Amino acid sequence: MHLLVFLHTSVLALCFILACTRRHRTSSNPLVLHVFALCNYPALLTSGILCLEELEDTPIEDYPADVQWEHRVFMELINSYLGLLDRLTNGEEEDVIHMGELMGKGASGARGSDTKTLKSAVLEWLVPRGQAVIPPLARNIKSDCGFNHEITGTLLCLAGLDSLNTKTKQGLKSGETTVCGDQWPMFLYAGYVYDSEDPWKGLLRSEILIFGFKYVFTSPSSVDKELKATHSSNAYLHSMKVVMVGSLAYVATQVCSSSVFSCTDTVMDSKNFYCSILDLLEDPEESQEVVDLMMWSTRCIFPNSSSSQQSISKNSALAKIQEKCAALREVPTSTT
């Protein structure tokens, strides 16, 4: 099959998955991988193929860190879809670029779709159910959102700053206080409380993030625990049964950059925000905290998944069997 035929028959579905860092489980590889959500796909594919040729003579460890990182992203993409590498290497250069452009178009469309649908939903999550947002927020007036509103301004306030301080609020509202992507807002934390002595405490465990994840990956109705979906969810379609670092970083960025919180992308520096969260979650030094976070998130999002690793009920038959097996293993083997 010619490469262009392959592009027109499958690339749109492929792009949708790649662009949103949604997970795909291949039949030959049980590991669920993710691809960087903000890629320049034509450049990624072109440079990735060239790098493969250069690696025949030079190990990847000899390259700068940014090249190693880009190569890792490229390989995750390639390894996620059987036959993709062959089609890329056997195609003409213009075919590869065209495929990258289609991926970019799919990425933009997928992100735009999520942003649009989350726009109205986030308004419902700003305050506890049954309470009203005061003063009211109009869905189509951006000037009232972000740091210009008391509630959204408090949730957006940078961790470590006093959201009740008048000078702090004015500095954020006027833009005098510059917001960098690696300065995270309070809404990322459980209960919207930041502990400077333990910055990991509650990080990425807020109710808004859980709602956002369910809204994007399972179904809007699952946010209210009322499954009324009329079609299969993204998670179901792509065999997604656990929360992974890429999908969590993606949802956090989507919620943060929604028009409810941000009038323009420059207000919250979305790209650096996304990268900084991804860097933390992929840092080997933080692996234990990340594992705990992923297990907790999976239990919240996919409670029926075996990966949730729910505890065994005390005094159940299974618990008794495991206790008996453990006791037998502890008995030393007698010698004759």
Image (cartoon, rainbow, N blue to C red):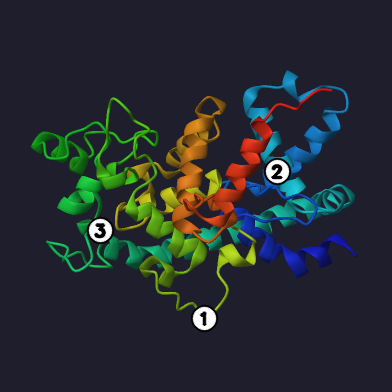
Label 1 crowd bin: few (<14), some (14–19), many (20+), radius 10 Å: few
Q: Amino acid at mark 3?
A: Leu
Callout in the foreground (1, 2): 1
- Mark nearer the N terminus (1 vs 2): 2
Q: Whole-percent x and y of residue 222?
A: 43, 68
Disc 3 to disc 1, C-alpha distance: 27 Å
- Measured in 3D between alpha carbons, the distance from the residue under mark 1 to the one under mark 2, in whole angstroms, is 32 Å
Name which residue type carries label 1: Thr
Q: Which residue is mark 1?
A: 230
Which residue sits at x=29%, y=25%? 197
Q: Which residue is mark 2?
A: 76
> Could you tell whether 230 is left or right of 226 in the image?
right
Q: Secondary structure at mark 3?
A: loop
Q: Residue at x 19, y 41 (%)?
A: 174
Residue position for label 3: 126
Residue 199 against residue 149 in the figure, above or below? above
Instruction: Name which residue lies at 80% across and 40% down.
Output: 49
Left or right relative to 296: residue 146 = left
Which label number is shown at residue 24?
Answer: none
Task: Quadrant for residue 334, please give it.
Answer: top right
What residue is shown at x 58% (from left), y 53% (from top)? 318
In the image, 70: left or right of 202? right
Within 10 Å of disc 3 (Cα), the crowding (few <14, some 14-19, many 20+) is some
Residue nearer the viewer, 239 or 335: 335
Q: Is residue 119 visible?
A: yes
Q: Percent from the top left, x then y, of residue 184?
A: 34, 37
Q: Residue furthest front?
A: 336
Q: Quadrant of the C terminus?
A: top right
- Element carrying mark 2: helix
Image vertical order of residue 258 relative to residue 60, above or below? below
Of the 4 image quadrants, the one containing the N terminus is bottom right
Viewer-closest of 232 and 308: 308
